[in-house]
Image (cartoon, grey):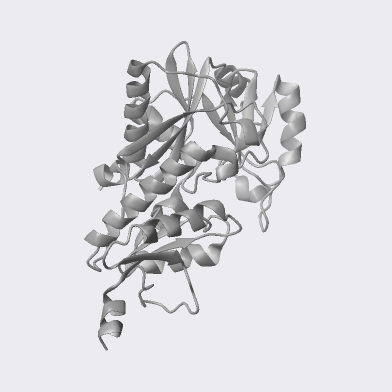
Amino acid sequence: MASNNKTNKMKKIGVLFGKERSFPSAFVERVNSKNIDGIMAEPVQIDKALQGVPSGYSVIIDRISQDVPFYRTWLKNAALTGTYVINNPFWWSADDKYFNNCLMTQIGIPVPKTAIIPSNQLPDDTSAESFSNLAYPLDWEAIFSEVGFPAYMKPFAGGGWKSVYRLENADEFFEKHKETGQLVMLLQEEIVFEEYYRCYCVGQKHVRIMPYEPRNPHHLRYQAGFTPSPEKLQEMTEIVLKINKALGYDLNTVELALRDGVPYAIDFCNPAPDADIASVGPENFEWIVETMANYTIELAQANNGERKIAWGGFVKDSA
């Protein structure tokens, strides 16, 4: 009976993931190796999903629900019934890269000039009449004048460098836009940078600035020779914290491109950021595993079963 009581009091930290392996297994092993009384970590196990029934986890790190709608709605129930979910599944469902850029213009973070472009093909179950309020053609001259060329075109939501185009002129834009089907796209100013950094942010308080070269092959992108001054490092740290406090993410990466010494936020909607040892490298991998282990233990210890959902300053200030 004593063993059962101890099991009932155990606070579990779960990782929800797909084909990813290196981070989930290292994270679980790291948490458990600390031998914290009343705390254990494991891959999330789901054998049923019933409304209003708690998940059994104090904390869950979500690494896959952006690709699995079943997991996303299951996590919403988990958050509703007392699990602290990283990241907030309600906000993650509502967020997108265009809104992110719009928000940055309101809080004083430099971002590339950006326009949102309707899909080239009509969405399913719509017709031309569904777009009665949309001018045709759009004012392309004004859009191109604002953004300029060269420019990048990419989906307004999602990631992984899928369907990303570098465009030299308007003719190339129209040619490539035909390839994007039903995707809603961003057209974004190219920032010709001197230095580039990808920055982990954990718990809206822990930041790791990583030199990053997006023009390299994927497995070599973290092998970059950029070395920020202490002053620039502090400036970028403050920007990363400001962005994540506004968005409310407990785990995110922010990409900063330095042009004429000014950090521009390029991509900062990454609630399941790359944490694979093969791409980020051993030192960055060690940092994210250790920092997430300590942070989630802290959250689990503080979780008394009451609902606690992380909302960003944008939402809280608007309430």
Image quadrant assignment for residue 172: top right
Does 7 sit left or right of 283 as displayed? left
Residue 8: image x %, image y %? 29, 79
Image quadrant assignment for residue 180: top right
Residue 264: image x %, image y %? 45, 23
Does 306 sit left or right of 165 as displayed? left
Residue drawn at the location 48% of the way across and 79% of the way down = 48
Visible in this render: residue 152? yes
Residue 302: image x %, image y %? 22, 59
Residue 225 in the image: above or below residue 267: above
In the image shown, does 232 or 170 lie closer to the viewer? Answer: 232
Residue drawn at the location 36% of the way across and 68% of the way down = 57
Residue drawn at the location 63% of the way across and 20% of the way down = 141
Residue 243 in the image: above or below residue 258: below
Residue, far bottom: 1
In the image shown, does 190 or 186 lie closer to the viewer? Answer: 190
Visible in this render: residue 157? no
Residue 294 in the image: above or below residue 308: above
Does 258 sit left or right of 173 as displayed? left
Which quadrant of the rendered structure holds the N terminus?
bottom left
Residue 136: image x %, image y %? 66, 34
Please count the marks in the image: 0
In the image shown, does 78 or 123 lie closer to the viewer? Answer: 78
